[in-house]
Each structure stands twice: as structure tokens, then as C-alpha cells.
Amino acid sequence: MNLNMTFFGQMITFIVLIWFTMKFIWPPLNKAIEERQQKIAEGLAAAEQSQKNLAQAQQSVDAELRTARTKANEIIEQAHQRANQIIDQAKNDAIAEANRQKSAAEAEIAAASNRAREELRKQVSTLAVTGAEKLLKREIDANAHKALLDELAAQL
């Protein structure tokens, strides 16, 4: 094998190239790679933290929804109870009004019945007086015999 100067020149050039690359090119490349790895690691950590925060937020939202549903159900139940109370109150008011109207109607019927009896008594007393007048063939003065007529009306 014949080693000549070209080979040694190439070897020296190659060594200088390796030294230059190791001294000036390799450290910035290595630094850029490390910075990129660090950014990726930070991004993954942030993503993992975001996942945890999202899970916590979802749990919080679920808890709030459960609470809201419970409160909504309570409000609905209270509304149903209040509606039932209003219905019961309306029924009681309607019954009381019906009883009041019934009492008023009964009182009016009783008053009308009493008026009819009084009217009937007056008619009967008038008929009795007329009949007695015909029997006696004389006229009886109603004003003069008012006590007699009142007694007759009381007996009827």
C-alpha cells in the first residue's frame, strides 16, 4: 500500500473538520436539541396538568349539576305542594261559599215561607170575617175588632 502525501493531507483536513465541527457546530446543535426536548417535556407536563384540571373541572361541573338537579326537584316538589295547598284552599273556600249561599237561600226560603203563612193567615182571616159577616148579615169593622182578628190569625 502506498501512502502518499495526499492521503496525509486528506487525513489532516478530516481531523481539522472534525475538530471544527466538535468545537463550533456540534454544541449549538446539541443545545438546540436539548432546548427542543425541554420544550416538548414542558408541553407534555402542561398537557398532563391540563388533563388533570379538565378532569377536576368535569367533576366540579357534575357535582354542580347534581346539586342544581336536586334543588330543581325540591323547587318542583314545593311547587306541587303549594299547588295542592292552593287547590285545597280553593275547595275549602268553595265549600264555605256554598254553605253560606245555602244558608242564605234557606233563610230566604224561611222568610218567604213566613211571608206566605202571614199572607195566608190574612186571607183566611179576611175569609173568616167575610163568612162571619155573611152569617151575621152585618158588617164587622176590622179596625174595631183588631184584637179579635189578631187572636184569630194567631190561632190559624
Image (cartoon, rainbow, N blue to C red):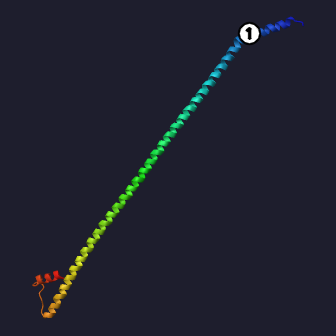
Residue 123 falls left or right of residue 105: left
Taking the spot 12% from the left edge, 84% from the top edge, the residue there is 148
Taking the spot 36% from the left edge, 60% from the top edge, the residue there is 90
Q: Quadrant of residue 71?
A: top left
| Element marked by disc 1 | helix
Instruction: Give the image location of residue 112, x and y in percent.
Output: 25, 76
Q: Nearer the viewer, residue 119 or 81?
A: 81
Taking the spot 56% from the left edge, 32% from the top edge, the residue there is 52
Residue 27 falls left or right of residue 122: right
Instruction: Give the image location of residue 101, x and y in percent.
Output: 30, 67
Q: Which residue is mark 1?
A: 19
Residue furthest front in the image: 155
Q: Quadrant of residue 29?
A: top right
Instruction: Give the image location of residue 1, x and y in percent.
Output: 90, 7
Instruction: Give the image location of residue 132, x and y in percent.
Output: 15, 90
Q: Quadrant of residue 16?
A: top right
Taking the spot 11% from the left edge, 82% from the top edge, the residue there is 147
10 Å neighbourhood of mark 1: few (<14), some, or many (≥20)?
Answer: few
In the depicted structure, whether residue 90 falls above or below residue 4: below
